[in-house]
């Protein structure tokens, strides 16, 4: 964290850990998180499994597949033919600074200058930042050597040895003294001075603001996290805010979550004076006025990171995004520590203090096993006895089903989060959904859905939405009643981590609620499947006057009218799908088709579009409804092809668990196999009845 009088290119001033409004145990936990951050950096001392190694890079690279690919290539080169477990050991020992250098491949970032150490000399490369009077910028500096021998770089008198053709990242200030080969290096390229002005930002309601100058450099009010979203756009939340800025042209943007457009203004504030900017975003649609409320089922206040998240941050984000429902989950990273457990202990079963008639916030749970999958739980009335299995070499036991059962007893609605990470084609065999090792994929979903232990699947998530949608439709087609939900896995303790440092609610599940918004009413709407999930567009589905979650009992030969409608400038295509595939597709805003009923089926609507500023997902724009079920003579859909896919999946899951699951004895294996056998019986009975 910066010292007084400094500004930094990617850090922020820490919030006050002694907030007297917080419960004592919550204050103590936040103080402990700050200590862990100060001692260990962004990993907070967690076990260095692969995604914890990635945390080390987040402050520089914002995460991403480039880094993962580089990790895998480097590990495979060091141990060709290694198993997944052996590769994880190699990854834990890799030099992260060198991996970052290789991923950048000569690029220079706004928050990571580079000192090139070549056989011919030394050169500094940087995206020059603006500095205000009385401030001294600091930044990480990549020491990048192409020399065949080790070289020592002195930074403020401290030596840093860079190995042959190696790399090191060290913190520097704009006034640091750097010496290489006995010669001082000029740091003029790091920053340039500018006169100071002030902006006052006013919208009339809490909003998300972005203030950016040259090279996209962000400007923030004092004391707020210096967050960047997935588009690397700086942002913060509130209303009637004051901030110091340079007296130079600045672009001011304001929005309020996905139901609003973005308003934008270019302003050049006058040096030494305060300039008022009054800017209000326009609504695209008003979901609550239609009885629909949007929620994010998977948000972390703290999960390691480069800052510490607080309830005050969560309140500002929820109101600034006009996010109706916020589920702040307590969960571990790679050890026994469960972040925000103290907050859950205090607030379980109660609305958080900033909730109001239009905004409900709760503490929930992320139940985690990296082999079997992670689940969100919303609406728990008390903390569970178990939050995770399989970490630090412990057994992948009991099966996730036991965690689901306990969370259900505690009143939770729950579903699998970020289910799949690699694309899965419509006709791919089940093996496509089982690959990847301990990568947090939702491998137990086919079991738990059959046994009625989960309510939903986060089709909208930060990973492969396409894969999640394909598996979701397989599960529904096989006779499982699952709602579409959305969980961003946004993390308030990260300022730069791609979509996970984007504001919570960048993807939302909208649920149709009868009467006032409450946590119980929202959970009930999910259980009933009255939902759609979206990265931004509004999406309606109507089947002869019925919407998602409803069921029509028809006779063979009956015909129904099916309509999808969307609102949102980013949508390129609308699609209507049944269990047999695409029924119709066309451009927005409305698509209508007729469906003549034969076998039991379902209808869903899907809206898609290319990458867009309104979507924080790298794959582009996406929205997907839960089904309207078309029953025939009282029979629910159980398409034989989908049921067989699930049965084949269970065979593959059994092989995977036998080979990969960590266990202490054969009894634990038997528990997994018994659960799979129960699910097989369910699917076989559906196949027999189809």
Image: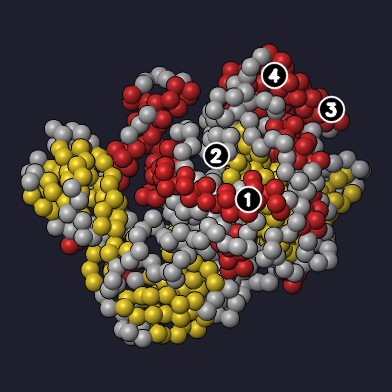
- Residue 348 lies, in percent from the top left, at 73, 51
- Label 3, on which residue? 685
Callout in the foreground (4, 3): 4
**Discs 2, 3 touching: Cβ within 8 Å:** no
Q: Secondary structure at mark 4?
A: helix
Q: Quadrant of the N terminus?
A: bottom left
Q: Tell me if 541 is positioned left or right of 538 in this view.
A: right
Mark 4 vs mark 1: which is more N-terminal? Answer: 1
- Whether residue 573 is visible, yes or no, is no
Residue drawn where x is 57% and y is 30% of the image: 391
Q: Secondary structure at mark 2?
A: loop
Residue 533 image-quadrant placement = bottom right
**CA separation in Å, label 4 and label 1:** 36 Å
Residue 333 is marked as 2
- Label 1, on which residue? 25
Mark 1 vs mark 2: which is more N-terminal? Answer: 1
**CA separation in Å, label 1 and label 3:** 51 Å
Residue drawn where x is 32% and y is 56% of the image: 111
**Discs 1, 2 touching: Cβ within 8 Å:** no
Q: Secondary structure at mark 1?
A: helix
**CA separation in Å, label 2 and label 4:** 24 Å
Name above or below for residue 381 compared with residue 253. above
- Whether residue 310 is visible, yes or no, is yes
Residue 668 is marked as 4
Q: Quadrant of the C terminus?
A: top right
Q: Tell me if 285 is positioned left or right of 152 in this view.
A: right
Callout in the foreground (1, 3): 1
Callout in the foreground (2, 4): 2
Q: Residues within 10 Å of mark 2 (few under 14, many from 20)?
A: many
Q: In the orientation shown, which residue stands out farthest toward the top? A: 666
């Amino acid at each position: 964290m910066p010292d007084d009088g400094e500004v930094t290119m990617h850090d922020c001033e820490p919030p006050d850990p002694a907030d007297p409004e917080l419960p004592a145990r919550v204050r103590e936990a936040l103080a402990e998180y700050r200590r862990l951050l100060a001692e260990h950096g962004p990993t907070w001392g967690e076990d260095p499994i692969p995604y914890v190694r990635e945390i080390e890079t987040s402050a520089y690279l914002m995460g991403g597949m480039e880094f993962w690919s580089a990790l895998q290539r480097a590990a495979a080169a060091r141990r060709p033919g290694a198993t997944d477990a052996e590769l994880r050991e190699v990854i834990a020992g890799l030099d992260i600074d060198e991996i970052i250098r290789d991923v950048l491949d000569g690029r220079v970032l706004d928050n990571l200058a580079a000192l090139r150490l070549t056989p011919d000399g030394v050169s500094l490369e940087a995206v020059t930042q603006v500095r205000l009077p009385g401030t001294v910028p600091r930044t990480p500096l990549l020491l990048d050597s192409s020399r065949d021998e080790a070289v020592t770089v002195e930074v403020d008198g401290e030596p840093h040895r860079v190995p042959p053709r190696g790399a090191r990242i060290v913190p520097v200030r704009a006034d640091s003294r750097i010496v290489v080969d006995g010669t001082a290096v000029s740091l003029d390229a790091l920053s340039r001075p500018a006169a100071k002005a002030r902006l006052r930002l006013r919208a009339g309601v809490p909003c998300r603001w972005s203030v950016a100058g040259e090279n996209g450099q962000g400007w923030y009010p004092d004391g707020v996290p210096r967050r960047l979203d997935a588009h690397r756009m700086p942002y913060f939340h509130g209303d009637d805010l004051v901030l110091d800025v340079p007296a130079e042209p600045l672009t001011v943007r304001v929005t309020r979550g996905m139901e609003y457009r973005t308003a934008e203004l270019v302003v050049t504030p006058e040096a030494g004076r305060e300039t008022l900017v009054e800017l209000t975003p326009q609504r695209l649609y008003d979901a609550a006025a239609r009885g629909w409320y949007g929620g994010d089922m998977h948000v972390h206040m703290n999960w390691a990171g480069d800052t510490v998240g607080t309830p005050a941050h969560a309140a500002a984000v929820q109101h600034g995004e006009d996010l109706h429902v916020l589920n702040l989950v307590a969960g571990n990273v790679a050890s026994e520590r469960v972040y925000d457990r103290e907050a859950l202990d205090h607030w379980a079963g109660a609305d958080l203090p900033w909730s109001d008639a239009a905004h409900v916030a709760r503490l929930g749970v992320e139940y985690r096993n990296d082999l079997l999958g992670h689940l969100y739980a919303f609406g728990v009335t008390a903390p569970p006895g178990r939050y995770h299995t399989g970490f630090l070499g412990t057994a992948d036991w009991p099966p996730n089903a036991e965690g689901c059962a306990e969370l259900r007893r505690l009143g939770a609605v729950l579903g699998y989060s970020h289910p799949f990470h690699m694309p899965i084609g419509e006709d791919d065999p089940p093996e496509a959904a089982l690959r990847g090792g301990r990568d947090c994929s939702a491998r137990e979903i086919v079991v738990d859905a059959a046994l009625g232990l989960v309510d939903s699947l986060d089709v909208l998530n930060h990973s492969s939405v396409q894969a999640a949608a394909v598996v979701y439709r397989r599960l529904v087609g096989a006779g499982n009643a699952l709602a579409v939900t959305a969980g961003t896995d946004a993390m308030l303790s990260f300022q730069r981590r791609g979509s996970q440092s984007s504001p919570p609610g960048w993807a939302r599940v909208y649920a149709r609620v009868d009467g006032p918004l409450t946590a119980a009413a929202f959970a009930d709407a999910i259980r009933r499947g009255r939902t759609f999930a979206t990265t931004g567009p509004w999406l309606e589905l109507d089947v002869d006057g019925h919407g998602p979650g409803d069921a029509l009992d028809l006779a063979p030969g009956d015909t129904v009218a099916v309509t999808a409608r969307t609102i949102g400038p980013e949508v390129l295509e609308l699609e209507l799908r049944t269990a047999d595939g695409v029924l119709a597709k066309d451009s927005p805003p409305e698509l209508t088709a007729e469906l003549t009923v034969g076998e039991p089926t379902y209808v869903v609507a899907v809206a898609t579009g290319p990458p867009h500023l309104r979507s924080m997902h790298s794959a582009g724009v996406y929205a997907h409804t839960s089904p309207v079920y078309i029953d025939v003579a009282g029979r629910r859909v159980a398409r034989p092809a989908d049921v067989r896919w699930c049965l084949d999946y269970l065979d593959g899951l059994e092989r995977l668990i036998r080979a990969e699951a960590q266990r202490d004895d054969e009894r634990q294996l038997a528990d997994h196999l018994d659960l799979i056998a129960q699910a097989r019986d369910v699917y076989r009975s559906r196949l027999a009845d189809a």
